[in-house]
Image (cartoon, grey):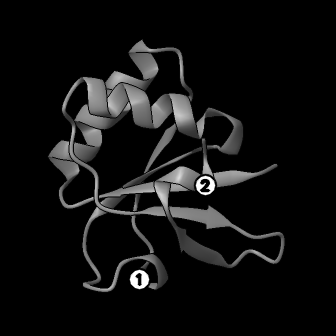
């Protein structure tokens, strides 16, 4: 399955994001951000299906939930930071 990640600076923001996405019908899982995805080694992320990313980002922006970075998971398990327009 193709997974992507949205990172947040705090657990509170990630929880807000999770609530907004789930209320909008987008499935996601709240996780502690792995070090390889967060330069500062802190923060939380939401994992969601790639096909749901554009809708998820729109929901977060409509509810003014700030997020930090976007990551796409590769077939080999690695992740890479991506720009928002790659999901549109």
Residue at image coords 61%, 55%: 86
Instruction: Pinpoint residue 24: horizontal percent, then vertical percent.
Output: 44, 15
Depth check, front residue: 15 or 3: 3
Q: Is residue 48 left or right of residue 7?
A: right
Reading the chain from its start, which is encountered first: label 2 or label 1? 1
Q: Is residue 31 above or below residue 63?
A: below
Residue at x-position 50% and y-position 42%: 29
Q: Quadrant of the C terminus?
A: top right
Residue 15 place in picture, x, y as percent: 26, 38
Classify mark 2: helix, strand or loop: helix
Label pair 2/1, CB-CB below 8 angstroms: no
Number of callouts in the render? 2
Residue at x 53%, y 52% (from the top left corner): 85
In front here: 37 or 53? 53
Asked whether, in this view, residue 78 is left or right of residue 13, the answer is right
Q: Find residue 3 and report its horizontal and vertical position in percent.
A: 68, 52
Q: Position of residue 76 (x, y in %)?
A: 82, 77
Check disc 2 and report the residue beneath it: 86
Disc 2 from disc 1: Cα separation: 23 Å
**Few, some or many C-alpha atoms within 10 Å of disc 1 (few <14, some 14-19, many ≥20)?**
few
Q: Residues within 10 Å of mark 2 (few under 14, many from 20)?
A: few
Name the front one of labels 2 and 1: 2
Q: Is residue 16 left or right of residue 2?
A: left
Determine the image quadrant of residue 77: bottom right
**The residue tagged with tag 1: helix, strand or loop?**
helix
The dot on residue 35 is: 1
Q: Quadrant of residue 10?
A: bottom left
């Amino acid at each position: 399955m193709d997974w992507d990640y949205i990172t947040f600076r705090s657990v509170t923001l990630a929880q807000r994001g999770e609530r907004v996405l789930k209320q909008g019908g987008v499935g996601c899982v709240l996780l502690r951000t792995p070090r390889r995805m967060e330069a500062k080694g802190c923060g939380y992320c939401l994992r969601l299906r790639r096909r749901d990313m554009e809708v998820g980002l729109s929901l977060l922006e409509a509810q003014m939930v700030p997020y930090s970075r976007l990551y796409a998971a590769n077939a080999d398990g690695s992740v890479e930071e991506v720009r928002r327009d790659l999901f549109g």
